[in-house]
């Protein structure tokens, strides 16, 4: 059942905790058997479940990425350094889900501190793709995407710093939304790169992912980047249709080297949108090729600052040492390989003599990427691109090649650099593996991309009936 | 721009990360691969551009609601809530055996 259907049943009198209890039983059985996906880091015991019989998400089981603070379960960020750590406060998005009647069933696996594109960098082992257990679910919110794709919960929360909701949504065949920077509170989201981080939602349908977004959106005085704006009717936007909608297809997102199967599915999806009244045109975002180098200066720079707090003195695990310097180093030995790599890179680009060479340059390049979007959105309402260059890759395929891993985010990082909203929606399969198409919209125009995604979803649904 | 093992060891020290000699060697290669990719930014004409993030350069619409926001307690004067204040300091009762100083 979809989240909307569950909420309707509960509002009509079904036991509020019934669906979550059933979900917990199903998750426990599946995750302890031979087909386990390792999607969850922790599960709430049945006795700790709380829900409500009213609200937009009345009784809906929800999975939460394990970098969002909860007071009833540990928040580990997939890291040994926060193993077992329980926050004394709750993330605003989690509180809003509960207030809307949602039932938190567990915390999902992720790349350590959300740094990765495959969920292989977790201290608690990799999550597997429900469509092919030899493949990655994408990352860093791979646990949430896998949980929704496997049918464990109808919706889940993730975080998206460079594509960490949209890319796993594409790899797992579900819908994933990254809102405009400032739309959703980051209070209680463990910081990775603060100028890029946003909380996002997963759902099996456009309506469910949009409904979850509607619930968690809105101003929060606890987050100074949260914006005072009315929250539109996201959950109903998917039914608006696309008649007359101007859709731009950026040339830079369909390079010659793109997987031909992905290109074919993108073209077929565009034909469906045209059939429903959309007007498609080719556009250009000329600085797209600079997005990955820009991102991989800025994100590690911010990460190295944000992760400086994990020193053993304040919270989390503490290593043993003869003096305070030894203690810091022993504590930080708990970081995994990718986190250490990014802290090293970030510290280097911020260090004396290199700051302007790297960080200043990347900040200026970021401005150009944002200007590209400003210019193109004068002519089109929404952009359509592949979410990722390929379907899900094999476990271990890119772990020894950080640049190859980083390039899997080539179509998603631009939205984070510019602060615009983006979402991934399934557009077909290649060799049994799902492929996602990405809609990008102007700042604060989530409802436009949701309308386009809803029309595409409806087109596929009509075909299958 | 590239790094050598001495650079990597120095950065590790700044970041409070301990690395074995093998790890320094391995990370030197990896960081150089990444930096080689990042060097692609050198082709851009950037001199005239701001280095502020787009969100900061173009202020976001009103991020605070004046009518809903509580006044910051640090912006009110000490006199408005303290029993006695002198030269910006709170006046407290004298320790036993000492007399209260004149208020002025």
Image: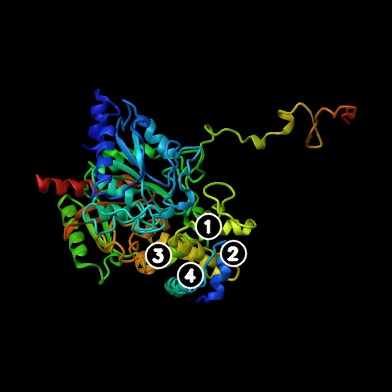
Using residue B41 as the reference point, say whether residue B83 is left or right of it. right
Q: Quick check: can you spot residue A274?
A: yes
Tell me whether circle 4 and circle 1 mark residues in contact (CB < 8 Å).
Answer: no
Within 10 Å of the Cα at label 1, are there few (<14), some (14-19), or many (20+) other Cα atoms? Answer: many
Q: Kindly state the secondary structure of the residue where label 4 is placed.
A: helix
Tell me whether circle 1 and circle 3 mark residues in contact (CB < 8 Å).
Answer: no
Q: Kindly state the secondary structure of the residue where label 2 is placed.
A: helix
State which mark lies toward you, 3 or 2: 2
Judge by depth and name the residue closer to the eye, A385 or A464.
A464
Figure colour scheme? rainbow
How many angstroms separate mark 3 from mark 4 (CA)?
29 Å
Earlier along the polypeptide chain: callout 1 or callout 3?
Answer: 3
Q: Which residue is mark 4?
A: B23
Q: Quick check: can you spot residue A355?
A: no
Within 10 Å of the Cα at label 4, are there few (<14), some (14-19), or many (20+) other Cα atoms? Answer: some
Q: Which residue is mark 2?
A: B14
How many angstroms separate mark 1 from mark 3 (CA)?
30 Å
The chain that hosts pointer 4 is B
């Amino acid at each position: 059942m979809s989240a909307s259907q569950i909420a309707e049943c509960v509002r009509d009198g079904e036991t509020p905790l019934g669906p979550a209890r059933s979900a917990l039983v199903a998750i426990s059985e599946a995750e302890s058997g031979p087909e386990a996906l390792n999607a969850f880091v922790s599960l709430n015991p049945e006795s700790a479940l709380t829900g409500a019989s009213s609200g937009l998400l009345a009784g809906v089981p929800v999975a939460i990425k394990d970098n969002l603070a909860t007071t009833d379960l540990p928040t580990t960020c997939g890291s040994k350094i926060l193993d077992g750590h329980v926050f004394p406060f709750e993330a605003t998005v989690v509180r809003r889900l509960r207030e809307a009647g949602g039932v938190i069933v567990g915390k999902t696996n992720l790349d350590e501190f959300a740094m990765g594109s495959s969920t292989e960098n977790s201290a608690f082992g990799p999550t597997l793709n429900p469509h092919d257990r030899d493949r990655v679910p994408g990352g860093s919110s791979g646990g949430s995407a896998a949980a929704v794709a496997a049918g464990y919960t109808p919706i889940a929360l993730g975080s998206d710093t460079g594509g960490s909701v949209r890319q796993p949504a594409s790899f797992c065949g579900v819908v994933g939304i990254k809102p405009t920077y400032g739309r959703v509170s980051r209070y209680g989201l463990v910081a990775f790169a603060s100028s890029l981080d946003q909380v996002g939602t997963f759902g099996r349908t456009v309506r469910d992912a949009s409904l979850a977004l509607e619930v968690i959106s809105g101003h929060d005085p606890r987050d100074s980047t949260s914006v005072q704006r009315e929250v539109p009717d996201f959950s109903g936007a998917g039914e608006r249709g696309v008649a007359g909608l101007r859709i731009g297809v950026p040339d830079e997102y369909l390079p010659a080297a793109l997987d031909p199967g992905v290109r074919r599915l993108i073209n077929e999806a565009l034909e469906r949108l045209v059939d429903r009244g959309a007007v498609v045109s080719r556009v250009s975002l000329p600085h797209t090729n600079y997005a990955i180098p820009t991102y991989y200066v800025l994100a590690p720079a911010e990460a190295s600052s944000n992760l400086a707090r994990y020193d053993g003195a304040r919270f989390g695990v503490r290593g043993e040492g003869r003096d305070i310097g030894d203690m810091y180093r022993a504590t930080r030995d708990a970081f995994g390989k990718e986190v250490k790599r990014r802290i090293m890179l970030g510290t280097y680009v911020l260090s004396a003599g290199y700051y302007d060479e790297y960080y200043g340059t990347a900040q200026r390049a970021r401005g150009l990427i944002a200007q590209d979007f400003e210019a193109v959105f004068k002519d089109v309402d929404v952009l359509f691109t592949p979410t990722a260059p390929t379907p899900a890759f094999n476990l271990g395929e890119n772990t020894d090649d950080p640049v190859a891993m980083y390039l899997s985010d080539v179509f998603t990082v631009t939205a984070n650099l510019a602060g615009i909203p983006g979402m991934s929606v399934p557009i077909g399969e290649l060799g049994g593996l799902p492929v996602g198409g990405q809609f990008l919209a102007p700042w604060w125009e989530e409802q436009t991309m949701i309308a386009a995604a809803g029309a595409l979803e409806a087109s596929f649904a009509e075909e299958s009936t | 721009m590239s790094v050598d093992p001495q650079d990597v060891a120095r950065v590790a020290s700044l970041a409070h990360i301990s690395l074995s000699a093998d790890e320094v060697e391995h990370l030197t290669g990896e960081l150089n691969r990444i930096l080689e990719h990042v060097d692609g930014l050198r082709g851009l004409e950037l001199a005239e551009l701001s280095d502020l993030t787009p969100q900061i350069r173009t202020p976001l619409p009103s991020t605070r609601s004046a009518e809903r926001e509580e006044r910051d307690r640090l912006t009110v004067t000490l006199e408005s809530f303290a029993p006695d204040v002198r030269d910006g300091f709170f006046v407290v009762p004298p320790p036993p055996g000492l007399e209260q100083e004149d208020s002025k």
